[in-house]
């Protein structure tokens, strides 16, 4: 008996040590990335860097237009994905039978697993060549919206699932149709799921280069914000970092790349931090 | 659209099956224009299923199969012509646990009317006052109609749920153990409300309590294993 108890204790201690070890490695990795980015890019940061456009030569000027372009493209991605995610989430949680809902969830997971470069190639053939848009910020926004659609949809659908069954039954009992129940109860009670999914999705979208590489962005020579759709690319932080990295043998370009990386990191962190209270609310709801 | 024999609702041979499980079988019942009819029975005897069959809430349960006839004011409830949403508005329902929406007391009373577009051209203050008066709650909440409904006691919330249903002016009220989650004082208040509602319309009350059925109902039926055992009576509500 004592032997068996000792073995059980050893297994528990081993399991706990493995869990702590995995946590420490993940935290250390994150810390290393943040530390390297701040260490290398801190000197490049200045008010001028944040408020002036980039100049002709790599590493000269600031990143104002890249910040604006990134926000512009992700904001439109949010606008595009929201109704799509709402429709999908309503189908998942309110309209579809169990089999259809399960199939839809599988498809969403599959879409989530598509490598981002494939979105880029698909977008290039569809928007740039087939529609003849050339490089267009809208193509980039649509592709980013497609890419984050599973995250936003699942987040919103989970929030809908957490709605008390009593609310739904009461509303139906009063005579509200499925559509009116969606408008009066389901959407208002679950909208925090949209914000949570959007902020997480946009945190990912803001840092993506592959989907916009061939479709939506330029290195320089474009206005801060687009004036149309066709042949109207924008500047974006991830692509700016990618392009500067290719000139990293030049110390000025490397410093500017690290500086832009800090700005991008801060942007992503802001999205993530904003989603935190909503995620905590979801955890609380799940525990109730 | 009146019933053929003065009954507001006639049930003939009603049966409900969930998958392979027979929950109700051969139910026959007529409800008068006003007064309380009580259904007693142990848990799992099919009481709540019966109520949900009458206003077609069972339509929302995927594996429920219904047979027989339910006629509301002479019109078959399960005919293709009957709009289930409109039917549920006319056959109001109060549930075991009070459900208030996360909004003000006023917004809760107006919830159904507002979201079905039935509030246009009506004096919403008058509607709120009238519904809360019928539910016996106005005196307690008169000065705080815009406060969150969640601040009310459970008993008050149940009467608010009643007011919300009554605001839609249902012709028949289904009450599914409306006092089982309440303390004795709140239960007494809700019973008083049901008694006064029953003066103008019919109530089908499901309850665990023989005493409550005796206090409130003109007619008491006992449901066991999906069938009515005996057609008894308690006493006149008059």
Image (cartoon, coloured by chain):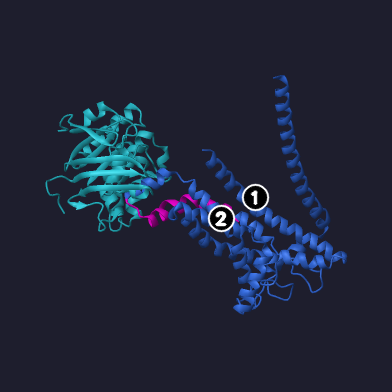
Chain colours: A blue, B cyan
Residue B116 on image: x %, y %: 33, 55
Q: Pointer 2: residues within 10 angstroms few (<14), some, or many (20+)?
A: few
Between B112 and A135, the residue placed more toward the observer is A135
- Residue B108 seen in this snapshot: yes
Taking the spot 64% from the left edge, 54% from the top edge, the residue there is A271
Disc 2 marks which residue?
Answer: A106
Label 1 vs 2, first from the N-terminus: 2
Taking the spot 32% from the left edge, 45% from the top edge, the residue there is B164
Disc 1 marks which residue?
Answer: A273
Element under disc 1: helix
Residue A22 on image: x %, y %: 74, 42
Q: In which image quadrant can residue A216 be found?
A: bottom right
State left or right for residue A165 relative to residue A221.
left
State left or right for residue A128 relative to residue B170.
right
Element under disc 2: helix
Cα distance between the residues tagged 1 and 2: 29 Å
Between A284 and B106, the residue placed more toward the observer is A284
Q: Is residue A171 above or below residue A234?
A: above
Q: Pointer 1: residues within 10 angstroms few (<14), some, or many (20+)?
A: some
Q: Chain of mark 1?
A: A
Residue A207 on image: x %, y %: 69, 60
State left or right for residue A157 relative to residue A116.
left
Q: In which image quadrant can residue B194 be found?
A: top left
Which region is colored magenta?
Answer: A175-198
* Residue A147 magenta: no
Q: In which image quadrant can residue B95 be found?
A: top left
Q: Chain of mark 2?
A: A
Main secondary structure along the magenta-highlighted residues: helix
- Residue B217 seen in this snapshot: no
The answer to whether dots 1 and 2 both sit on one chain is yes
């Amino acid at each position: 008996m004592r032997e068996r108890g000792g073995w059980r204790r050893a297994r528990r201690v081993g399991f706990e040590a493995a869990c702590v070890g995995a946590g420490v490695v993940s935290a250390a990795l994150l810390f290393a990335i943040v530390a390297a980015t701040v260490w290398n890019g801190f000197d490049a940061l200045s008010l001028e860097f944040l408020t002036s456009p980039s100049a002709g030569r790599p590493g000269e000027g600031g990143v104002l237009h890249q910040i604006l372009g990134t926000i512009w493209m992700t904001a439109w991605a949010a606008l595009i994905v929201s109704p799509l995610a709402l429709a999908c989430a309503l189908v998942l949680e309110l309209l579809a039978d169990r089999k259809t809902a399960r199939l839809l969830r599988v498809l969403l997971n599959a879409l989530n697993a598509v490598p981002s470069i494939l979105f880029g190639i698909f977008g290039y053939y569809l928007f740039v060549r087939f529609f003849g848009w050339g490089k267009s910020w809208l193509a980039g926004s649509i592709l980013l919206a497609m890419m984050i659609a599973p995250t936003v949809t699942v987040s919103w659908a989970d929030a809908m699932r957490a709605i008390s069954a009593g609310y739904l039954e009461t509303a139906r009992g009063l005579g509200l149709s499925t559509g009116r129940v969606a408008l009066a109860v389901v959407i208002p009670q679950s909208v925090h799921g949209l914000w949570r999914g959007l902020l997480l999705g946009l945190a990912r979208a803001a840092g993506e280069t592959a989907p916009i590489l061939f479709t939506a962005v330029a290195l320089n020579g474009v206005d801060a914000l687009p004036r149309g759709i066709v042949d109207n690319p924008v500047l974006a932080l991830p692509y700016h970092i990618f392009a500067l990295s290719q000139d990293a043998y030049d110390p000025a370009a490397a410093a500017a790349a690290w500086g832009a990386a800090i700005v991008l990191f801060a942007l992503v962190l802001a999205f993530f931090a904003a989603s935190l209270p909503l995620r905590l609310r979801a955890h609380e709801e799940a525990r109730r | 659209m009146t019933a053929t024999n003065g009954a507001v609702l006639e049930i003939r041979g009603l049966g409900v099956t969930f998958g392979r499980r027979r929950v109700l079988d051969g139910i026959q019942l007529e409800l008068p224009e006003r007064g309380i009819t009580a259904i007693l029975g142990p848990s799992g005897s099919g009481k709540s299923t019966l109520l949900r069959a009458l206003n077609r809430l069972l339509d929302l349960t995927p594996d429920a199969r219904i047979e027989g006839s339910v006629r509301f004011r002479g019109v078959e409830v399960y005919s293709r012509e009957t709009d289930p949403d409109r039917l549920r508005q006319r056959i109001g329902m109060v549930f075991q646990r009070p459900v208030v929406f996360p909004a003000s007391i006023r917004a809760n009373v107006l919830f159904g009317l507002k979201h079905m577009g039935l509030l246009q051209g009506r004096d919403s203050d008058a509607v709120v006052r009238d519904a809360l008066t019928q539910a016996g709650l106005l005196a307690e909440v008169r000065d705080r109609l815009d406060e969150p409904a969640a601040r009310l006691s459970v008993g008050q919330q149940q009467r608010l749920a009643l007011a919300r249903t009554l605001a839609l002016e249902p012709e028949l009220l289904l009450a599914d153990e409306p006092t089982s989650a309440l303390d004795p004082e709140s239960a007494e208040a809700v019973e008083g409300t049901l008694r006064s509602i029953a003066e103008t319309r019919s109530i089908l009350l499901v309850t665990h309590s023989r005493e409550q059925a005796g206090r409130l109902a003109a007619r008491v039926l006992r449901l066991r294993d999906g069938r009515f055992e005996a057609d008894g009576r308690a006493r006149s509500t008059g």
